[in-house]
Amino acid sequence: MEKDIGKLKKNDTTDIIIRIDDFGGRKGLTIREFVTSERYTGFTKAGVRIPVSDFGKFKELIDSIEEADLEESKEDVPSPKKPKEQKTLSNEDSEDRNEMPDY
């Protein structure tokens, strides 16, 4: 028994599918990625399955999220990364590395 609940577009080639299904004789809610591309079309391994026994708790957790909790603030937006400085060896550094130690 499979019942598709809906889908959300993740990007041009991937949707997130929400469905009720029966896997291994156990009914549950499955949230998985579905890819449509030239190389592969179908479900990926990425996703989660909520067993019927945990669905009430899952729904309670989802319902406890306030929309205000999801709004981005300045703290949530990553600042642009500065390019790392590359260390270059001067001639003196390279000469020091080639010298043999005094024993």
Image: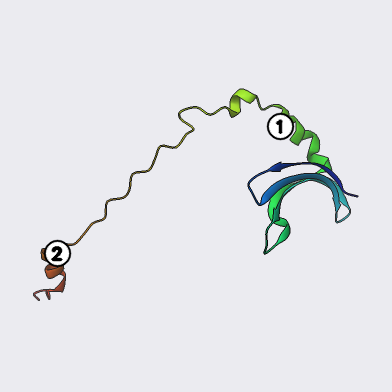
Callout 2 amino acid: Asp
Residue drawn at point x = 57 percent, y = 27 percent: 71
Task: Tell me if residue 59 comes above or below residue 68 in the rendering.
Answer: below
Give percent across and percent down for residue 33.
70, 50
According to the image, what is the colour scheme of the structure? rainbow
Along the line of sight, the residue nearer the viewer: 59 or 41: 41
Question: Which residue is labeled 1 in the image?
Answer: 62
Give percent across and percent down for residue 94.
15, 68
Real-space Cα distance between discs 1 and 2? 59 Å
Residues at marks 1 and 2 touching, judged by CB atoms closer than 8 Å: no
Disc 1 is placed on an element classified as helix
Indicate left or right for 70 with 75 as reference. right
Give percent across and percent down for residue 101.
12, 74
Callout 1 amino acid: Ile
Residue drawn at point x = 70 percent, y = 62 percent: 40
Indicate left or right for 19 with 84 as reference. right
Task: Tell me if residue 18 comes above or below residue 66 in the rendering.
Answer: below
Q: Mark 1 vs mark 2: which is more N-terminal?
A: 1
Residue drawn at point x = 66 percent, y = 52 percent: 13
Along the line of sight, the residue nearer the viewer: 52 or 77: 77
Query: Furthest-right residue in view?
Result: 1
Residue drawn at point x = 41 percent, y = 37 percent: 79
- Hey, which quadrant is residue 52 in on the image? top right
Disc 2 is placed on an element classified as helix
Query: Which image quadrant: the C terminus?
Result: bottom left
- Hey, which quadrant is residue 64 in on the image? top right
Question: Which residue is labeled 2 in the image?
Answer: 93
Give percent across and percent down for residue 15.
70, 47
Along the line of sight, the residue nearer the viewer: 36 or 74: 36
